Image (cartoon, helix red, strand yellow):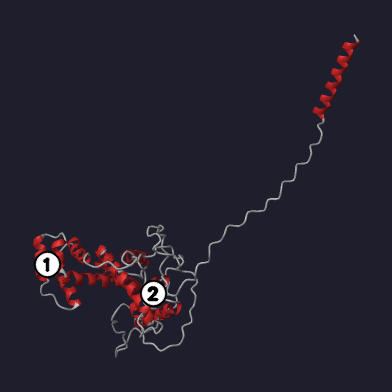
């Protein structure tokens, strides 16, 4: 009997201990302090990009102002007895590269400048012919028929002008492109800009109303966009000269009807010796031909050109206006981001009061 009582009492004691543990559990030990782990280091910052160079119209941020040493120089334009700006012998920006106008351009710069211009000309001739419809529109005065003043037509005028000029101006302006490629140092580029702006300002003042008021916004818009397209027009004329000069060789390979090719070849046999005469002859011979046939003759002529030596010249990708000048345009020609909605064009540069 005692044996059974002992077992029962032992069981009750065990049950009492278990019950006490369930109702009032002991306080848990504090958690172990974790080992110190240093915070992650900040990501390495990319190296600072060089400051934008003079004339870089692609970059809209603050420009570094370059002090130009005082030198004697000849402007790229002259005025006639009537005070009007006389026609210049070449594109304005190319003239700024000549030492007579830009004393900071030296003999040691000639080879690299010549190589760049040769590659640029080669590419521009192809661009002008590939976009022959646009080039001929500008040549025929399409931009001069746009109204940049009326609020009802101003936005459409800018839209139409861009549509005509952007495809035929892949490199942008000459000074900016050369500066971005480190073909002009800061002082050379600043002097080029100075010469170009003097020419632009002279033309603007020539067209300022006698009352001294602001220059007509339509004149400004037409000047800006005609200037953007001017290089393509010059390139197209070089292609026309080549087409007439090599007519007998290239027309049979142009894909044109043999009878038409023979007629055109015959018409070129007594071509004028000068470039302007050959351009005029090309226009006369092709004025009634569809654009596809004009382009076919021109492309056959361009195919005879030797390819420029070395790495081809690739335009910088289009951008929203804040691409830094040090980026390599040859790295990835397909990396162009989708074009952004362009900012509204000013009717006149801010410095024109």
State the quadrant of the C terminus: bottom left
Residue situated furthest right in the rendering: 2
Residue 116 location (% of width, % of height): 34, 72
Mark found first going from the N terminus, 2 or 1? 2
Residue situated furthest bottom in the rendering: 81
Q: Residue at x 60, y 57 (%)?
A: 42
Residue 7 location (% of width, % of height): 86, 15
Question: Helix, strand or loop at disc 1?
Answer: helix
Image quadrant assignment for residue 75: bottom left
State the quadrant of the N terminus: top right
The label number, if any, that marks residue 121 in the structure image: none
Residue 328 location (% of width, % of height): 42, 64
In this view, 9 is above or below 49: above
Question: Helix, strand or loop at disc 2?
Answer: helix
Q: Residues within 10 Å of mark 1 (few under 14, many from 20)?
A: some
Q: Residues within 10 Å of mark 2 (few under 14, many from 20)?
A: many
Between residue 278 and residue 329, name the one nearer to us: 329
Residue 140 visible in rendering = no
Identify residue for label 2. 175
In this view, 353 is above or below 7: below
Identify residue for label 1. 264
């Amino acid at each position: 009997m005692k044996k059974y009582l002992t077992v029962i009492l032992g069981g009750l004691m065990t049950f009492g201990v278990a019950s006490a543990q369930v109702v009032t559990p002991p306080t848990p030990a504090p958690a172990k302090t974790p080992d110190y782990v240093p915070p992650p280091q900040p990501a390495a910052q990319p190296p600072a990009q060089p400051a934008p160079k003079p004339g870089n119209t692609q970059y809209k941020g603050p420009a570094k102002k370059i002090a130009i040493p005082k030198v004697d120089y000849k402007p790229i334009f002259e005025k006639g007895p009537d005070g009007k700006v006389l026609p210049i012998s070449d594109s304005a920006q190319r003239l700024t590269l000549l030492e007579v106008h830009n004393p900071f351009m030296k003999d040691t710069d000639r080879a690299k400048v010549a190589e760049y211009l040769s590659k640029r000309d080669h590419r521009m001739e192809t661009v002008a012919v590939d976009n022959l419809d646009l080039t001929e529109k500008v040549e025929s005065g399409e931009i001069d028929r746009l109204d940049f003043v009326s609020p009802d037509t101003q936005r459409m005028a800018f839209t139409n002008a861009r549509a005509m000029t952007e495809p035929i101006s892949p490199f942008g302006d000459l000074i900016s492109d050369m500066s971005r490629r480190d073909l002009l140092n800061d002082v050379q580029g600043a002097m080029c800009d100075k010469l170009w702006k003097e020419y632009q300002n002279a033309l603007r003042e020539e067209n300022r109303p006698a009352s001294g008021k602001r220059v007509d916004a339509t004149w400004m818009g037409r000047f800006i966009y005609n200037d953007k397209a001017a290089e393509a027009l010059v390139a197209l004329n070089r292609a026309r000269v080549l087409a007439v000069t090599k007519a007998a060789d290239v027309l049979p390979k142009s894909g044109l009807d043999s009878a038409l090719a023979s007629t055109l070849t015959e018409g070129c046999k007594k071509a004028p010796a000068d470039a302007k005469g050959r351009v005029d002859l090309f226009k006369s011979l092709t004025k009634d031909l569809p654009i596809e046939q004009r382009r076919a003759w021109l492309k056959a002529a361009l195919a005879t050109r030797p390819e420029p030596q070395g790495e081809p010249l690739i335009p910088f990708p289009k951008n929203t206006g804040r691409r830094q000048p040090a980026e390599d345009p040859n790295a990835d020609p397909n990396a162009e981001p989708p074009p952004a909605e362009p900012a509204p064009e000013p009717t006149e540069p801010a410095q024109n009061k």
